[in-house]
Image: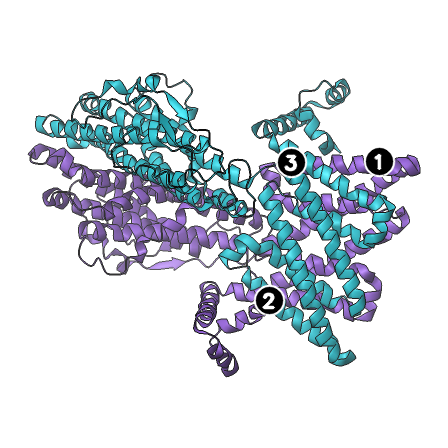
Chain colours: A cyan, B purple
Amino acid sequence: MEIDHSPVQGKAMPFSRARGLLEALPGKAEAEVIGFAKSVRKLGQDDPRRIIHSLKVGLALSVVSLIYYLRPLYKSFGEAGIWAVLTVVVIFEFTVGGTLSKSFNRGLATLLAGALGLGAQHLASLSGEKGQPVVLGIFVFLLAAASTFTRFFPRIKARYDYGVLIFILTFSMVSVSGYRVEELVVLASQRLSTILVGGAICIVVSVCICPVWAGENLHNSVASNIENLASYLEGFGGEYFQSGQGSNSDRSFLEGYKKVLNSKPAEDTMANLARWEPGHGRFGFRHPWKQYLKIGALSRQCAYQIEILNGYINSDNQVPLEFRCKIQESCTQISSECGKALKSLASAIKTMTIPSSANVHVENSKTAVKELQISLKAVSLEHDQELLAILPGATVASILVEIVISVEKISESVHELSNVAHFKSVEPTVSPEKPQLLHRGAINPVLDGDSDHVVITIHETSAGSQENENPKAPKIGQRVEL
Amino acid sequence: MEIDHSPVQGKAMPFSRARGLLEALPGKAEAEVIGFAKSVRKLGQDDPRRIIHSLKVGLALSVVSLIYYLRPLYKSFGEAGIWAVLTVVVIFEFTVGGTLSKSFNRGLATLLAGALGLGAQHLASLSGEKGQPVVLGIFVFLLAAASTFTRFFPRIKARYDYGVLIFILTFSMVSVSGYRVEELVVLASQRLSTILVGGAICIVVSVCICPVWAGENLHNSVASNIENLASYLEGFGGEYFQSGQGSNSDRSFLEGYKKVLNSKPAEDTMANLARWEPGHGRFGFRHPWKQYLKIGALSRQCAYQIEILNGYINSDNQVPLEFRCKIQESCTQISSECGKALKSLASAIKTMTIPSSANVHVENSKTAVKELQISLKAVSLEHDQELLAILPGATVASILVEIVISVEKISESVHELSNVAHFKSVEPTVSPEKPQLLHRGAINPVLDGDSDHVVITIHETSAGSQENENPKAPKIGQRVEL
């Protein structure tokens, strides 16, 4: 029963008795228990919603078990009440969307399959005592085979997989149970009502106590993925060009992007569940969840590029110093401006405001690309570099140019999102930006401190309101007149 | 009931009545039905095992429903027989490993939770009529919360998620059912026996009729992923350097690698399920499934590189012809040798033979890298190329060099697999390879036709035998003496 204490061990509570028990254990077992307790603690700390979810499941089950102890309820549900317990256990999911999707699937599938099962029973009974099992067997075979096959359709798999399972289950149980039709109607209505009670308890607990919304999860995870890419790019210049220095410092920001590489299945699942959820918090009922998948796909594209780039950070530094110095400034500029653009896109998603501040950084990164091109032209004119020696550095530069294109695409799709999801507009009362000079070959030193002078007023329109019907986010590539 | 006919519509059978019905429908509905029929057909053709699986589920359910019609069996199981139907529906999975894993989880969890539930009932009954519901409620709450929390552990999630669910379910049902302990023992034993019957039917049908093994799936999917990468690389040289020509020809081989990018979750799932499977076909019980995950991760690494490379195929061709001509031969050679190496690695996995023929191609690709380096040195000496103009071409060359490193890593890990999984050795009776000259700057023309002269004898040792305990596959980088 060790398992019972795990959530408690996860919290730093004084319990001398447990400690006494632990000390009595042999060393190895003690180490294992402590290791287990630590991993429990870490799981809880990483996402405290996990602890809350576990307690919610316990609560929902305790509530449904009351049905068995309160006599009047017990009488009306009969022994079918056990189905309420079963329903709670299998449909209570981590997210509200998951719980709603399973409740809906279970309810509808039971209703449909129950009706079909009754029909099948009736048809089979027409064929006499001996024919009945054969006819029923054929029905079950055909329906189970056909339904199972539909589970291979990707769309059905994604949304109605559980419903099809319950459909097969209920149809088989009703049609083979051998009860007379009148008994079956009573049984079926009992089962349906218990499913409704179980489902209702799950939905109430899931929605009312610290709800975890799949849509909000998707929203936050897409934003934090972009942030991970941004952290890498902001730090890349320093890492690549000052390699050797501070190699022992915290380089965890170089690892975050790896989470993005395999983010597709989680995002797909969350988007599917989000469709079941009602409007919540800042998200309306028809929030454009699909657009997040588009942003996610573009983020992964950028993560692939960073993955290749990362190979060059870790390789031995063989590029001649002279060439590195020539591209250092513009490459660092490109990567840091891309990072800043992504950071402000991520924060625009998080705050649900129009990501206009990203445009400046995208433009700056494009300017830096032009500067890089001028530096590269200068290199070839001097004839003092061997192509083979400078190739790794040139490749890094080349991939950075590709990353600028990726970042621009991400920015475009975030603008699209801000448009269809009616993000709030951010209007500075004082024009903060120095005129964006599309000059070549010189760094714009004003960029580092410009954010200090921005005064931003956020119009306090509620998220659900339709005031900003057409905010017309400026298209990337257009000049931004703030 | 449209759904009923779907598998039948999938096959090209003459059914004039259905056609008559179809023609009677309005045009749009007809088009939809035809579209649906087509997608059913495509699903079946893509993987005929789906059709077989659907029929197997139908068969298993029909068999279990016999339990209700054969009187002697019915009597011994009682009404708990409905649990056998339920068991079949929920544990019959596409792969044998999935079915076994769910059967095992369900059986063990029911046993454990049943025993614990009885204990909880007994403890609760000690606290009197009024205290009993309270004590039971607390038990249910604690156990459900703790068990739910364990489902967040990645290892438990991957292997025992279903078991934990059934554990909570059974414990709640037993402890809140309100039966007396003697009744419960009868009920529990009935439930266990029906689960055993349901599980046994599933396992027999799943294993005996066209079994789908998760392990074999993993094996084939890892091999075919490598093949997809190989097809791309074999075709890359032609596509990149002769761009414009034959752009309308079949370029589907350029798309296959995209499947590899997101292959991680499917591979992880299959490896988890494969652990549950007994030895089957060419795979022993302790086949090193984990090694496939390692190969899969390296394949994805290579796919990321190809994804970047692919960006350059589709971009406008701006690299000066002169530079392209200089790198064309060695780049084409690198990419095609990498492709051949991966092809022979994939085929070695498929045939479960030691991948010695890949070594030659890996070495050749390394030789081609050296040739490329010589070409690049020559470029810089001539001073007639502008760095900026040749940068895209140089980047392609640079990424190809990285791909050679990736391919070598893949080759190493496949050799490791062949070693731990005791692949059969392939020994040519006549030494087929010309001595591998590590010369610089010249193409080795003998490579194209060399396979024509190889006489290969495969030692017919059975896959399960331990004869090749230490085949000592040559490490990459060592010379290969065939």
Residue B56 horizontal/vertical position (percent): 60, 65
Q: Which residue is mark 2?
A: A145
Could you tell me which chain the residue with mark 2 belongs to? A
Out of B174 and B430, give the one closest to the viewer.
B174
Question: In terms of secondary structure, where does tag 1 sit?
Answer: helix
Q: Amino acid at mark 1?
A: Val
Vertical position of residue A92 compared to residue B46: above or below: above
Task: From the viewer's perspective, tell me whether residue A286 is left or right of residue A332.
Answer: right
- Residue B126 visible at all: no
- The answer to whether dots 1 and 3 both sit on one chain is no
Q: Residues within 10 Å of mark 1 (few under 14, many from 20)?
A: some
Q: In the image, which is nearer the foreground, mark 2 or mark 3?
A: 3
- Check disc 2 and report its element: helix, strand or loop: helix
Residue A53 is tagged as 3
Question: Which corner quadrant of the image does residue B439 belong to?
Answer: top left
**Disc 2, disc 3: CB below 8 Å?**
no
